[in-house]
């Protein structure tokens, strides 16, 4: 009887572990919170950054399909300043140390990518491979500022 109970507990633990590692729910939540768009559509109709009453910055989120170009560089000072102007806290800004080059149609764009994703992207993607990026949109607050930058929060290889 004791062995049977131990075996049942072991099977239950395996089931819970296997269920918790299923990432379907994670991607479904991201797809709901990140509507699909294109780089061109974002440039034409750039969403405004909103400020929540609590002081937390709420950034519009989108997913878009781009082609990885296989190049990286340090995040630009221009993007760091935009992150600061948008209201991101220093800890959030430090998460973005590198930018990767992506292409959409004929346009190339450097996007800041979370440091935790850089190595994973390098492992899973090759140059000229398509990737679905989950991003937050940073935009200058002043009317005359036209700078829009996408912060890459996650990705899926297509």
Image (cartoon, rainbow, N blue to C red):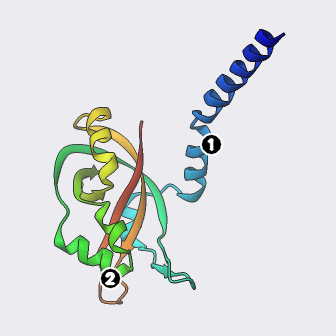
Q: Which mark is residue 25?
A: 1
Left or right of 49 on screen, residue 72: left
- Front residue of 103 and 82: 82
Q: CA distance from mark 1 to mark 2?
A: 33 Å
Quarter location, residue 107: bottom left
Q: Which mark is residue 118?
A: none
The residue drawn where x is 42% and y is 64% is 136
Tell me the quarter of the image containing the C terminus: top left
Which residue reaches farthest bottom? 143
Which residue reaches farthest right? 1
- Front residue of 152 and 84: 84
Q: Which mark is residue 85?
A: 2
Give the percent coordinates (x, y) of residue 61.
48, 63
The residue drawn where x is 41% and y is 45% is 155
Give the percent coordinates (x, y) of residue 50.
50, 80
In this rendering, the answer to whether 45 lies above or below 2 is: below
**Mark 2, secondary structure of its residue:** helix
Which residue reaches farthest front? 2
Q: Quick one: label 1 or label 2, which is nearer the N terminus?
A: 1
In this rendering, the answer to whether 11 lies above or below 72 is: above
Give the percent coordinates (x, y) of residue 79.
24, 71
Left or right of 152 on screen, residue 69: left
Quarter location, residue 19: top right
The residue drawn where x is 80% and y is 12% is 2
């Amino acid at each position: 009887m004791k062995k049977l109970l131990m075996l049942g507990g072991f099977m239950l633990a395996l089931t819970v572990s296997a269920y918790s590692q299923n990432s379907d729910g994670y991607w479904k939540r991201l797809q709901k919170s990140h509507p699909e768009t294109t780089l061109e559509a974002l440039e034409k109709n750039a969403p405004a950054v909103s400020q929540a009453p609590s002081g937390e910055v709420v950034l519009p989120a989108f997913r878009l399909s781009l082609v990885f170009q296989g190049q990286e560089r340090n995040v630009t000072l221009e993007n760091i300043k935009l992150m600061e102007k948008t209201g991101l806290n220093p800890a959030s800004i430090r998460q973005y140390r590198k930018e990767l080059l992506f292409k959409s149609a004929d346009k190339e764009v450097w996007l800041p990518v979370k440091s935790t994703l850089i190595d994973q992207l390098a492992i899973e993607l090759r140059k000229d491979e398509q990737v679905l990026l989950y991003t937050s949109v940073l935009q200058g607050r002043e009317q005359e500022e036209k700078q829009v930058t996408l912060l890459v929060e996650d990705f899926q290889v297509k």
